[in-house]
Image (spheres, helix red, strand yellow):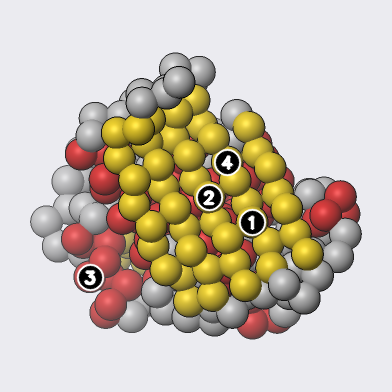
């Protein structure tokens, strides 16, 4: 059983584009201060950032829970929002339901969930239309350069 | 290639103070799509973008980008520049477009980050 070393939860507010990304950069600073390998940090923070942007763009609100154990970094982002009607489609690179406003911000080109998958060692996504989505990712501490 | 050489080649203006002009740029990632930068950047890359909002700097932080050049003469606002300075990421602006900027740097030997 992995030993838990650090745990913290952050609130994410839907449509708050100005603050979008703050939580993930804060997590990066925490991981750096804990002397985690730079490659591992990068994977974890890309997952956190993309998941955070998804909440800001699509959901009403969400919570990001960040857990560090002696084996892995866990990032769970649970939101209250519209859910994803076709998860398989949403996982395809280039598929997007983003608005023009989101694209003007540099997001919504259908790369978010694929980026999360690419940077995770394990990933599970549960979603219910009209209720919300939970993304749970783990990044192993010893599997990257 | 150093940041000084990049700035000279693209006729850049510096927007942050105390820039370390000797910083080595290992490669370039060029896009207005932030997820593309996250997907295809490598550590120590130079980021070229026309997107000037606060997320451009947050993306640069997450992607371990070493410096940002805003193309097409687009200038970020003060808050964006302040965040970059706080994160020790030099920020420059060039009046050149994305295509010409990439072409010039490529001809000088820089390659894409992916």
Labelled pair 2, 4 in contact (Cβ < 8 Å): yes
Report the chain holding disc 1.
A
Residue A119 placement (x, y as % from top left): 58, 36
Give the alpha-carbon distance from disc 3 to disc 2, as whole Å: 30 Å
**Tag nearer the camera, 3 or 2:** 2
**Residue on which disc 4 sits:** A137
**Tag nearer the camera, 3 or 1:** 1
- Residue B72's tag is none
Give the alpha-carbon distance from disc 3 to disc 1, as whole Å: 34 Å
**Residue on which disc 1 sits:** A134
Residue at 75% from the left image edge and 68% from the top image edge: A83
Report the chain holding disc 3.
B
Report the chain holding disc 2.
A
Image quadrant occupied by the N terminus of chain B:
top left
Residue A38 in view here: no
Residue at 28% from the left image edge and 77% from the top image edge: B79
Labelled pair 1, 4 in contact (Cβ < 8 Å): no
**Residue on which disc 2 sits:** A76
Q: Are marks 3 and 1 on the same chain?
A: no
**Residue on which disc 3 sits:** B82
Mark sitting earlier along the chain (2/4): 2
Give the alpha-carbon distance from disc 3 to disc 4, as whole Å: 32 Å
**Tag nearer the camera, 3 or 4:** 4
Mark sitting earlier along the chain (1/2): 2
Report the chain holding disc 4.
A
Give the alpha-carbon distance from disc 1 to disc 4, as whole Å: 10 Å
């Amino acid at each position: 059983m992995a030993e838990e070393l650090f745990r913290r939860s952050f609130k994410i507010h839907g449509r708050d584009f100005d603050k979008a990304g703050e939580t993930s950069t804060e997590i990066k600073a925490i991981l750096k201060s804990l002397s985690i390998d730079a490659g591992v940090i990068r994977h974890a923070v890309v997952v956190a950032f993309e998941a955070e942007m998804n909440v800001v763009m699509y959901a009403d609100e969400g919570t990001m829970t960040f857990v560090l154990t002696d084996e892995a970094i866990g990032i769970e982002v649970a939101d209250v929002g519209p859910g994803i009607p076709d998860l398989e489609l949403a996982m395809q690179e280039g598929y997007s339901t983003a608005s023009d406003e989101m694209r003007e911000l540099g997001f919504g080109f259908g790369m978010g969930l694929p980026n999360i998958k690419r940077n995770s060692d394990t990933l599970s996504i549960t979603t219910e239309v009209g209720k919300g989505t939970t993304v749970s990712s783990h990044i192993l501490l010893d599997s990257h350069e | 290639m150093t940041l000084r050489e990049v700035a000279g080649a693209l006729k850049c203006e510096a927007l942050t103070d105390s820039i370390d002009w000797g910083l080595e740029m290992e490669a370039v990632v060029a896009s207005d799509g932030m997820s593309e930068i996250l997907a295809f950047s490598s550590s120590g890359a130079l980021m070229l973008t026309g997107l000037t909002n606060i997320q451009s700097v947050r993306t640069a932080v997450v992607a371990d980008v070493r410096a940002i050049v805003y193309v097409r003469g687009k200038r970020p606002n003060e808050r964006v520049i302040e965040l970059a300075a706080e994160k020790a990421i030099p920020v420059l602006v060039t009046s050149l477009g994305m295509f010409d900027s990439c072409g010039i740097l490529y001809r000088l030997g820089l390659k894409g980050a992916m």
